[in-house]
């Protein structure tokens, strides 16, 4: 099997392969139905597989599809491991491996980055006491440009307009406004929701049981769309001068580990899953890494997100321009290019194997 073959054609097929592979490797399986259907009429579920001790002291978590359509890639890494690389492998005593498949099954199945309520799930995990309201100061200013109330157009000079905006306000302002999370524009990009999502509730209710009394947790959450094509970075909230940061650099390499606010391409967000997980388990050494694999230049990704969002809210399902916008979104988060697929799946598998050795040895 070539690494690229681990990509599935759609959510339903990814789900079946994940469940079959996990079952064949001896994982204990659970499923959480979110009460919606795929375009083919199948139930949408978050699937969970656990391998190893139920009283583990060290747990590696590998999650995919928090951003729906980005699940094509994260799922492919999980499937490659299940169908090939984990064959014959079992965690050592007191260790466990936890796979979370398709954390946003709606977005995965319907080709959206957000969920059924247009919620960007990686902006929905607000900490206890934080309010689901408010937006960066300048979001309202950029709203009409990024979220026009009309169907997309193939011939709009997006790049010229975007560059004009960057020249006027500066790239830093844009970076610290658009993608960081907003709670006031429900039809806009990077909307964090008005309340905890179903995914939030499922993780909130079950993570404590899955982790038991684990003392060490290493969690890798797979994403695409940020960074240089076919390379990856691991983003952490950990401060650069901490023991934990040095540990991460030692295990994964100084060129891979980046603190979120020090990175050129990245930005600090509200409601991220990582901070929430780490805060939820203060008694354990919970390390969360967002693995971002590059696809296309950032402006191409934003352009595709904007066009698909317009098609979803303001277009007609059958219009060719809307179909084009939907296909394009899938392409920018899961490029069809076989070389890209081979490369990212191999790197993703290698990353998981490093995480397993870091936690299991
Ligand atoms: Zn993502």
Image (cartoon, rainbow, N blue to C red):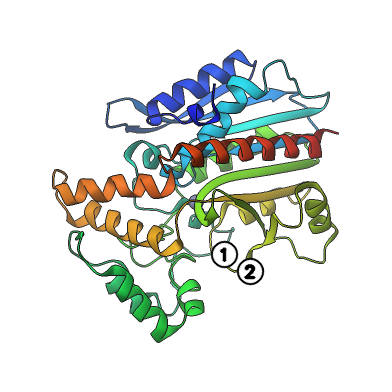
How far apart in space, not on screen, are marks 1 and 2 (Cα)?
7 Å
Q: Quadrant of residue 346?
A: top right
Q: Quadrant of the N terminus?
A: top right
Question: Is residue 28 at all visible to an observer of this figure?
Answer: no
> Residue at the location (66% across, 50% down)?
289
> Residue at the location (63% across, 63% down)?
260
Residue farthest toward the front in the current orientation of the protein:
339
Q: Which dot marks residue 261?
A: 2
Q: Is 315 situated above or below 335?
A: below
Q: Position of residue 193 (x, y in %)?
A: 41, 57
Sequence-earlier tag: 1 or 2: 2
Q: Quadrant of the C terminus?
A: top right
- Along the viewing direction, whichever of 256 and 268 lies nearer the viewer: 256
Q: Position of residue 124 (x, y in %)?
A: 48, 55
> Residue at the location (38% across, 26% down)?
12
Residue farthest toward the bottom in the current orientation of the protein:
168
SS under mark 2: helix
SS under mark 1: loop
Number of marks in the rendered image: 2
Can you tell me whether the CB of the residue at mark 2 lies under 8 Å from the nearest atom of ligand 1? no
Q: Position of residue 232 (x, y in %)?
A: 61, 51
- Along the viewing direction, whichever of 243 and 354 lies nearer the viewer: 354
**Residue density around tag 2, few if under 14, some if 14–19, many if 20 or more, within 10 Å:** some
The reply to whether discs 1 and 2 touch (Cβ–Cβ < 8 Å) is: yes
In the picture, measured across the screen, residue 245 lies left or right of residue 107, that is right
Q: Which dot marks residue 210?
A: none
Q: Is 144 situated above or below 237?
A: below
Q: Quadrant of residue 166?
A: bottom left
Q: Which residue is mark 1?
A: 266
**Residue density around tag 1, few if under 14, some if 14–19, many if 20 or more, within 10 Å:** some
């Amino acid at each position: 099997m070539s690494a690229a073959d681990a990509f599935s054609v759609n959510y339903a097929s990814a789900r079946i392969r994940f469940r079959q592979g996990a079952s064949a490797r001896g994982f204990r399986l659970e499923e959480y139905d979110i009460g919606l259907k795929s375009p083919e009429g199948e139930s949408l579920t978050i699937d969970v597989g656990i391998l190893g001790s139920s009283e583990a002291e060290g747990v590696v978590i590998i999650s995919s599809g928090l951003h729906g359509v980005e699940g094509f890639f994260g799922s492919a890494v999980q499937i490659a491991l299940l169908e090939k690389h984990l064959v014959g492998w079992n965690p050592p005593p007191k260790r466990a491996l936890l796979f979370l498949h398709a954390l946003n099954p709606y977005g995965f199945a319907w080709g959206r980055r957000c969920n059924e309520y247009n919620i960007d799930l990686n902006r929905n995990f607000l900490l206890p006491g934080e309010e689901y309201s408010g937006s960066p100061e300048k979001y309202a200013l950029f709203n009409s440009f990024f979220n026009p109330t009309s169907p997309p157009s193939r011939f709009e000079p997006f790049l010229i307009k975007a560059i004009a905006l960057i020249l006027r306000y500066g790239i830093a302002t844009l970076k610290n406004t658009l993608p960081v999370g907003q709670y006031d524009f429900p039809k806009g990009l990077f909307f964090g929701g008005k309340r905890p999502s179903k995914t939030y509730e499922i993780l909130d209710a079950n993570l404590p049981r899955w982790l038991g009394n684990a003392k060490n947790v290493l969690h890798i959450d797979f994403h695409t769309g940020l960074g240089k094509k076919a390379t990856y970075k691991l983003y952490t909230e950990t401060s650069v001068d901490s023991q934990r940061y040095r540990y991460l650099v030692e295990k994964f390499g100084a060129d891979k580990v980046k603190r979120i606010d020090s990175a050129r391409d990245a930005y600090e967000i509200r409601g991220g899953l990582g901070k929430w997980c780490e805060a939820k388990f203060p008694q354990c050494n919970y390390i969360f890494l967002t693995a971002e694999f590059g696809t296309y230049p950032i402006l191409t990704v934003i352009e595709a997100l904007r066009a698909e969002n317009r098609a979803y809210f303001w277009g007609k399902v059958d219009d060719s321009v809307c179909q084009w916008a939907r296909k394009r979104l899938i392409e920018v988060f899961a490029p069809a290019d076989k070389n890209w697929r081979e490369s990212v799946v191999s790197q993703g598998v290698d990353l998981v194997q490093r995480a397993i050795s870091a936690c299991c040895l």
